[in-house]
Image (cartoon, rainbow, N blue to C red):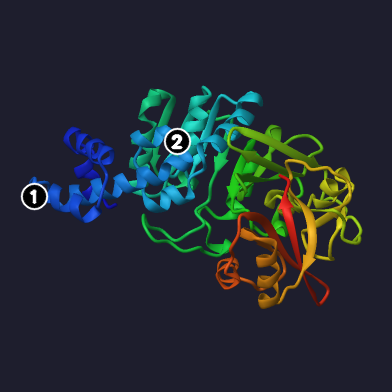
């Protein structure tokens, strides 16, 4: 979306047309033809059709709120899920923060979380279209939220209690963007770290951020949502918990669980294959807390350097997916297909670590048939490939 499209959309008639189109979405080409035949401008038609499609996709992150929001493609991809934004906001509120500066607010997802919990928000974004969309999305909160088109570096921080930073990690644009190197983040990381030393705050980064560059005085919290590791948040000042430097927050729907530690957890020893195999959640792996989870499960590593645990104890936890091992099966595709047919496996979940296998391609080659279902775990122990047929426990 560009300025012309946004200008055409941000009128009573434009927004009414968007609501009508989104409620009766169908074939895109037919919708475009119908709107053009009704005499609407090319800019408005493009904006309405694009926003209708984005609203449909945005429901996964924003639920029913997406029906009254505006988006850019890039902004939606990078936006914090509303459920996660609410958890971040609760930490600010519980620390006694009343005014927060959201530096790099994007389409306003995190600012919505802050405002919904009663915080006053000063939000800025360096992109003109994005800041205008944020202002629209945050308008229901009235004067509790102030949105400005500005860079993070020029934002006025007078009177704020804390900062929230979300450096741009992709090239500029509203549609297709690409990742940039750490040296090209905007605002620069050195500047962002300096703000976290001046004021309590949090900074959202990608989950694969180089952990060797994380300052020792910050709490690092990796977050997963419904099985996907979505972000790393660095916390400073009163927002960083005493004695916590590593944390993994695991969320599924409205439920959440967290494991914390003052440092990376010490790994457990490798052991022979047991009755169960456990796959740690991605946030646990990123936080390097596998060892703590393994000890709670009375488990050992299945193989050096592989994030699979194994145990005989009938234990599981929210921090792992657990599987009961049926048997070891051949890793050769033809031999494996023969075994699966003999077992009547028609539905197969395929999980892998440390092996170069495309699950979709392999599943097609196996020509599954039968009424039973199972999970196939593929990994390696040293140079030996290991294939296990298992049943998911959790």
| Nearer to me, 209 or 46 | 46
Depth check: give the residue in front, 128 or 81: 81
Q: Is 335 above or below relative to 191? A: below
Residue drawn 27% across and 52% down? 2
Task: Name above or below for residue 110 compared with residue 206.
Answer: above
Q: Residue at 76% of width from left, 49% of height from top?
A: 216
Q: x and y percent of residue 358 in the render? A: 59, 70
Q: Nearer the viewer, residue 213 or 307?
A: 307
Foreground: 188 or 380?
380
Is the C-beta separation of discs 1 and 2 under 8 Å?
no
Q: CA distance from mark 1 to mark 2?
A: 32 Å
Indicate the position of residue 32 as horizontal and vertical percent values: 18, 52
Residue at left 44%, top 61%? 171
Residue 173 image point, x, y percent: 37, 57
Element class at badge 2: helix
Residue 155 appears in the figure: no
Q: Is residue 113 visible?
A: yes
Q: Mark 2 or mark 1, which is nearer the start of the sequence?
A: 1
Element assignment for label 1:
helix
Give the residue pinned by disc 2.
63
Res 318 → quadrant = top right
Tell me the number on the disc at residue 280.
none
Q: Quadrant of the C terminus?
A: top right
Query: Neighbour class for label 2 at 10 Å: few (<14), some, many (≥20)?
Result: some
Q: How many marks?
A: 2
Is residue 79 found left or right of 52 in the rendered image? right
Residue, disc 1: 37
Q: Is residue 382 above or below residue 259?
A: below
Within 10 Å of disc 1 (Cα), the crowding (few <14, some 14-19, many 20+) is: few
Estimate the x, y position of residue 58 in percent, counting from the top left: 42, 43
């Amino acid at each position: 979306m560009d300025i012309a499209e946004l200008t055409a959309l941000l009128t009573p008639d434009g927004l009414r047309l968007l609501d009508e189109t989104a409620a009766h979405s169908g074939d895109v080409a037919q919708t475009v033809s119908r709107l053009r035949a009704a005499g609407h401008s090319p800019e408005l038609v493009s904006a309405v059709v694009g926003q209708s499609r984005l609203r449909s996709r945005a429901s996964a992150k924003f639920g029913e709120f997406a029906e009254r929001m505006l988006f850019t493609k890039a902004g939606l991809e990078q936006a914090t899920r509303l459920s996660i934004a609410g958890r971040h906001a609760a930490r600010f509120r519980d620390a006694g923060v009343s005014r927060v500066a959201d530096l790099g607010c994007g389409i306003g997802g995190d600012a919505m979380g802050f405002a919904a919990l009663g915080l006053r928000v000063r939000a800025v974004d360096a992109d003109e279209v994005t800041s205008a969309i944020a202002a629209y999305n945050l308008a229901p909160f009235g004067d509790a939220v102030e949105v400005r088109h500005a860079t993070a570096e020029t934002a006025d921080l007078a009177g704020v209690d804390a900062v929230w930073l979300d450096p741009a990690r992709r090239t500029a644009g509203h549609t297709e963007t690409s990742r940039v190197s750490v040296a090209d983040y905007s605002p620069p990381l050195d500047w962002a770290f300096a703000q976290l030393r001046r004021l309590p705050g949090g900074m959202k980064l990608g989950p694969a951020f180089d952990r060797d560059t994380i300052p020792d005085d910050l709490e690092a919290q990796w977050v997963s949502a419904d099985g996907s590791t979505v972000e790393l948040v660095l916390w400073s000042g009163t927002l960083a918990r005493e004695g916590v430097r590593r944390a993994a927050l695991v969320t599924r729907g409205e439920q959440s669980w967290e494991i914390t530690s003052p440092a990376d957890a010490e790994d457990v020893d490798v052991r022979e294959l047991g009755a169960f195999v456990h796959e740690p959640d991605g946030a646990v792996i990123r936080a390097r807390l596998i060892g703590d989870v393994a000890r709670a499960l009375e488990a050992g590593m299945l193989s050096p350097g592989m994030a699979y645990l194994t145990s005989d104890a009938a234990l599981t936890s929210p921090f792992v997916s657990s599987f009961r091992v049926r048997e070891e099966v051949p890793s050769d595709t033809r031999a494996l297909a023969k075994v699966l047919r003999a077992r009547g496996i028609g539905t197969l979940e395929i999980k892998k670590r440390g092996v170069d296998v495309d699950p979709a391609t392999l599943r097609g080659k196996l020509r599954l048939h039968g009424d039973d279902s199972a999970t196939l775990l593929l990994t390696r122990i040293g140079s030996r490939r290991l294939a296990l047929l298992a049943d998911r426990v959790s």
